[in-house]
Amino acid sequence: MSTISNKKYEAVIGLEVHAQLLTKSKAFAAVSAEYGSAPNTQVTPLCLGHPGTLPVLNENLVRYIIKMGLATECKVAKKSIFARKNYFYPDLPKGYQISQYDTPICYDGGIEIELEEYSKKIGITRIHMEEDAGKSIHDQDPYHTLVDLNRAGTPLIEIVSEPDIRTPQEAYAYLTKIKQIVQYLEICDGNMEEGSLRCDANVSIRPRGQEEFGTRTELKNMNSFRNVERAIAYEIERQIELVESGGEVVQQTLLWDANKLETRKMRSKEEAHDYRYFPEPDLPPVIVTDELLDDIKKDLPELPSVRFKRFMDELGLSNDVAYTLTETRQLADYYEKTLQYLNDPKAVANVVLTEVLRVLNDQSISIRDFTITESRLAELVQLKQDDKVNSSAMQEIFNEMLNSDKSAEELAKEMNLIQVSDSGFIDPIIDEVIENNPDEVQRYKDGKKALIGFFIGQVMKQSKGKANPKQVRERVSEKLEA
Ligand code: ADP
Ligand code: MG
């Protein structure tokens, strides 16, 4: 965006996020909602919209959405109803989706987002329940579109934000936070690339200082967080250029093209919709009792923002370290479980952030698939804390542990990496190094004290990493000063 226009205009952005819930069965039918089965194997007469079938509400759908509501400071309606959203599409046999319309179960909440320079609250207008449609597959048959109805009727929640977002970066941070929260709550896997999180973005611009909102466009078809950020940035720039050249923004739906990196108009036919919402006659109102609410509250895990603060306040970790360790619940759990075996928050954090995360990145795996258990990692760190191995040896042992069941100590012995703190071992090496480097010794004696690092390095090298660096430092300086 050009800086002149940036000074003159600000963007107003509101996001609608759909999250696919991890319930075992569908929203209103007793059939598996699991992803990835052979097409049309998880279909009941209800999913096909046969006459005479009746929906029955999955209780976990209600529990999951209330969890999300509580985690985002929403109010929870004691009574809300379902509504039919009517439209015709081949992957929607019933001719309508069951959704909620003017009484969402959760409303008036907010999420705190963190950016590098500041943090701010983004309002949540509402979170409501709905069922998903089936899937039309256009790329498997040269002549026909195929329909898979396994997804028809799987449970979704839709999270609608207030138009509080002002930049593409804030939109990115907001999505990251939503993903983190649903993963902590274990209600959705949060994977946008696989479609379990989907996001539509509403974007408008207005001259800075103006209170009234401009006309918005709605962006669809973005299948990664980066694409949401890019699409919004592109759209803001497009709107500014349009207005600056005397044009007007038209309210419309635009599709993001991730290859061309631009938005384009949907055919207007696809856009004209009138959903004719009306109350769903086959389902009773959803009543949330105080008992249910209390029960769900008891079930809530510690939320990421709370855990993040606790890691700083109670464990004494820095902002960055606490942030990274709490990014996913699994990593934070792994870290804390390791602390149960070895209560040294900083030393353990250090190994998790350097060694463990490096392996997860290199192998593109999640901590769930990581092979070193918490207790074994704790033993390794303990070896280092006890000065039995030095840090480069610790790294070598760590790598070996990835493919071995042996304990850190066994491996250290096998690999001959146990540090020797015996002066009978170290002193001859130090003497040799001093004897072989007379120039350095002279310069040290003339005042260049920084050369101590050179001697320590030489001794460590000669000892093949087995000397205890602390002891080496002491003995080297004693001998040089002598
Ligand atoms: P619809 O039902 O047509 O999608 P909503 O009023 O529910 O419309 O708004 C959908 C989203 O659009 C919300 O996230 C809201 O914050 C956002 N929004 C509303 N007005 C604007 C605007 N002028 N500019 C940007 N976003 C907006
Ligand atoms: Mg909308």
Image: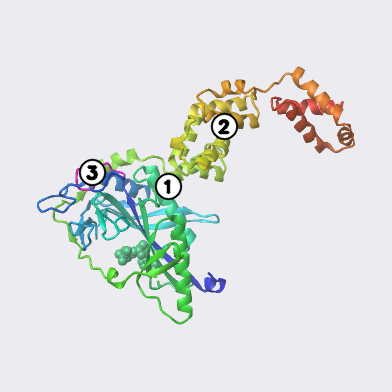
Query: Seen in the image, is 19 located left or right of residue 406?
Result: left
Q: Position of residue 20 (x, y in %)?
A: 32, 49
Is residue 106 covered in magenta? no
Mark number, residue 34: none
For the question of whether residue 267 can be seen, the reply is yes
* Earlier-in-chain disc, 2 versus 1: 1
Q: Which mark is residue 399?
A: 2
Q: From mark 3 to mark 1, how far is it between C-alphas? A: 24 Å
Q: Residues within 10 Å of mark 1 (few under 14, many from 20)?
A: many
- Tell me the distance, in whole angstroms, between the alpha carbons under discs 3 and 2: 46 Å
Residue under numbered circle 1? 180
**What's under tag 2, amino acid-wise?**
Asn
How many neighbours does mark 2 have within 10 angstroms: few (below 14), some (14-19), or many (20 or more)? Answer: some
**Furthest residue toward bottom:** 246
The image quadrant of residue 440 is top right
Residue placed under numbered mark 3 in the picture:
59
> Which residues lie in the magenta part?
22-32
Q: Amino acid at mark 1?
A: Gln
Which numbered disc flags the more N-terminal residue, 3 or 2?
A: 3
Please tell me which residue lies in front, 29 or 163. 29
